[in-house]
Image (tube, grey):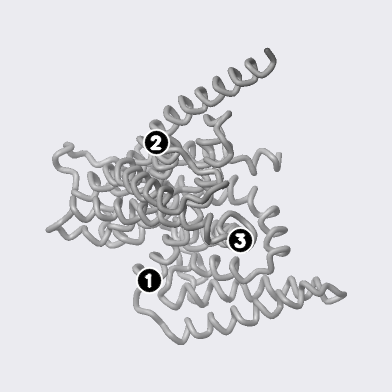
Amino acid sequence: MLALLRSPRFSAIALLTAAVLGLVVANSPLGPGLETALDAHSPWGAVGLDLSVSHWISDGLLAVFFLLVAIELKQELVAGELSNPKTAVIPAIAAIGGVVVPAGVFLAMTAGTEYTHGWPIPTATDIAFALGVLAMFGRGLPSTVRVFLLALAVLDDLIAIIIIAVVFAHDTDFTALGGAVVVLVLFWLLGRMLQRGGAARPWLITGMVVLGLLEWWLVYHSGVHATIAGVALGLLLPRPTGHVLYERVEPWSNGLVLPLFAFASAAVLIPDVGLGELSPTFWAVVVALPVGKVVGITIFGAVATRLFRAPGRATLSFGSIVTVGVLGGIGFTVSLLMNELAFAQDGEVLDEGVLAVLVGSGISMVASAVLVSIRAKRYRERRELSEAESTE
């Protein structure tokens, strides 16, 4: 069961199913009841946690997902594909292209309107979904495609984290932020002590858990989005401890956290308006995700490959870069979060943004499934032909 929950294929299917279910339920007779349930507030206002159920999901549970993203990012930076600057520079440049071009498309299509601040929405790539589509349809593709996609998606998430921390910070409380920094130092010190082992190990783990919860509470009150607490904690965890935590928490993230977030985020009413009445935000996201992403990743990635090609090192073909670019257009989880942060005060545009993310990501899913399948089939045929010739 745990192996299934860790599978990229399962994660992609679970996310898509949850999003479709949320959209269907919201537009059924059960919709009003679901809206009431998601808007219900917790009884913990006395300790500064007067959050609705939907905010507990996006601010609380999603911090777990970002904790795992940070652990994976640290692994890649320290010992993975991104640990060598010579191999990291190409996916890094491609990732920048995959952020700059979609943002530019969004800004161009919303120029002169009040919606330009939504430019971060189409800049994100969903690691789980993109890897899931690749795993489902990419049997036979060279491993370099997955490595490049993973490196690009991790760097893309790093950029998304910076955007969330900087662009969407509001009414910053520097006292809470300073307290969060102090807690992080204590968390790091306990992590160092944990590596030495000893009889105090259970107490150290308990202390780190308490400090982790306190860190989330302080970041939430600082005006920085609470998920950044998960990022900070993940980056400061010692790698062995982070690996163990990742292995234990990943099934819960794939099986509960991400599907629950997808369900709650997609639970919006489909606007009863004509296509011409939809806001520029809708069209900008629908175009920027599947088109802006593939154009940005492909152009920047192809140029970087030509500029930084090294003798003796395998490089991606232009077709493989295009394939990764199409996969990069699957925004989903982080794009939904960006949309929620950008248009939290405008319910109508918020709902249209959710639909746009689902449509844009859906187009990218279909396009990437077709393209990956075609290219994987060609690689398998070439391999079979090569094996047949070698036996003659």
* Residue ID for mark 3: 71
Amino acid at pointer 2: Val
Q: Quadrant of the C terminus?
A: top right
- Picture residue at 67% right of the left edge, 62% below the top: 242
- Cβ–Cβ below 8 Å for labels 2 and 1? no
Give the answer, above or below, for where 172 lies relative to 369.
below
For the residues labelled 2 and 3, the Cα–Cα distance comes to 34 Å
Amino acid at pointer 3: Ile
State left or right for residue 230 relative to residue 51. right
First in sequence, mark 2 or 1: give its number: 2
State left or right for residue 244 relative to residue 310. right
Occupied quadrant, residue 26 = top left
Q: Nearer the viewer, residue 285 or 170?
A: 285
Occupied quadrant, residue 142 = top right
Q: Nearer the viewer, mark 2 or mark 3?
A: 3
Position of residue 102 measured from the top left corner of the image (x, y, whole percent): 30, 51
* Residue ID for mark 1: 166
Q: Any mark on residue 24, and which?
A: 2
First in sequence, mark 2 or 3: give its number: 2
